[in-house]
Amino acid sequence: MSRSAAFRAVFLGPPGAGKGTQALELAKSLGVGHLSTGDMLRAHVARGTPLGLRAKGFMDAGKLVSDELIIAMVEERLSGDLQSSGWILDGFPRTVPQAQALDKSLGSSGRPLTHVFYFAVPRSELMSRLTGRRTCSSCGAIWNVTSKPTKLAGICDACGGALTHRSDDRPEAVGRRLEEYDKSTQPLLAHYRAAGCLIEIDAGRSPAQVNDQIIAVVKARAV
Ligand code: AMP
């Protein structure tokens, strides 16, 4: 698939729906940018920046970081290194004010969203996906101790890096993150459905099947 500078997509769905895995894959095959607000925040926490220090407590408790901080962080990237490329936003927007801020800044630059993918997964499956998830500290690949194990426990098959268990993937924080999703993020479905750009993906299936469905949509709606 060719590089698409006009591809501007949002990946929306509950934690554990597979947005990160699919966003990495699709960004690579389309040659577009991948902006994960969760990854950006974790990098700030790891570096101990002022933003990371403010965000860490909210993240560990499974709560959302304030709209003001997140919007500023995303706008800096969209008007900076991602200005002239296509991109996938993974984990943003997560609240109605974030979606409104995004609509406003894309509207004023004449570059509206081209796709909003909603990753639908039965609630019963999310808990095991989240508590079993392991992330490579080096390349960011995502594994799962039951559904997608690595050959050697704790070691990334792709690059040999050490796997980490996110502190907010522990059972106590997972329940809170799902509550936050229901309260703050679920209302975005109506926002994007009304705008006519919501595409529902059956994300309860295997990563390969989900990827096939996304690719089929992208091919059918070439931008
Ligand atoms: P994620 O990796 O997308 O699951 O995000 C991990 C955590 O980062 C979330 O539980 C929130 O604490 C924070 N976070 C990521 N994206 C956002 C956002 N758009 N708005 C508020 N908080 C966010």
Image (cartoon, rainbow, N blue to C red):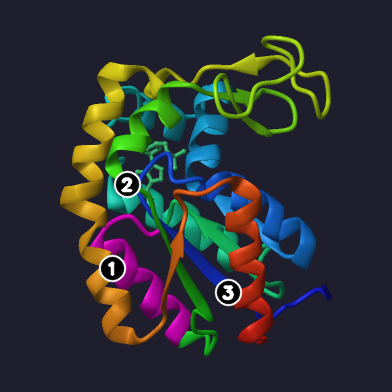
The first of marks 3 and 2 along the sequence is 3
Provide residue 93's location: percent of width, then percent of height: 38, 59
Q: In the image, 123: left or right of 202?
A: left
The picture quadrant for ligand 1 comes to: top left
Q: Residues within 10 Å of mark 3 (few under 14, many from 20)?
A: many
For mark 1, what is the residue? 189
Provide residue 32's location: percent of width, then percent of height: 72, 65
Q: Do the residues labelled 1 and 2 touch (CB within 8 Å)?
A: no
Q: Are marks 3 and 2 in contact (CB under 8 Å)?
A: no
For mark 3, what is the residue? 8
C-alpha span from label 3 to label 2 = 27 Å
The first of marks 1 and 2 along the sequence is 2
Q: In this view, does 27 lie above or below 193?
A: above
- Does mark 1's beta carbon lie closer than 8 Å to ligand 1? no
Q: Do the residues labelled 3 and 1 touch (CB within 8 Å)?
A: no
For mark 2, what is the residue? 122
Q: In the image, 26: left or right of 164?
A: right
C-alpha span from label 3 to label 1 = 17 Å
Range of residues picked out in magenta? 93-107
The amino acid sitting under disc 1 is Leu
Q: Residues within 10 Å of mark 1 (few under 14, many from 20)?
A: many
The amino acid sitting under disc 3 is Arg
The first of marks 3 and 1 along the sequence is 3
Of residues 105 and 142, the one drawn nearer to the viewer in this rendering: 142
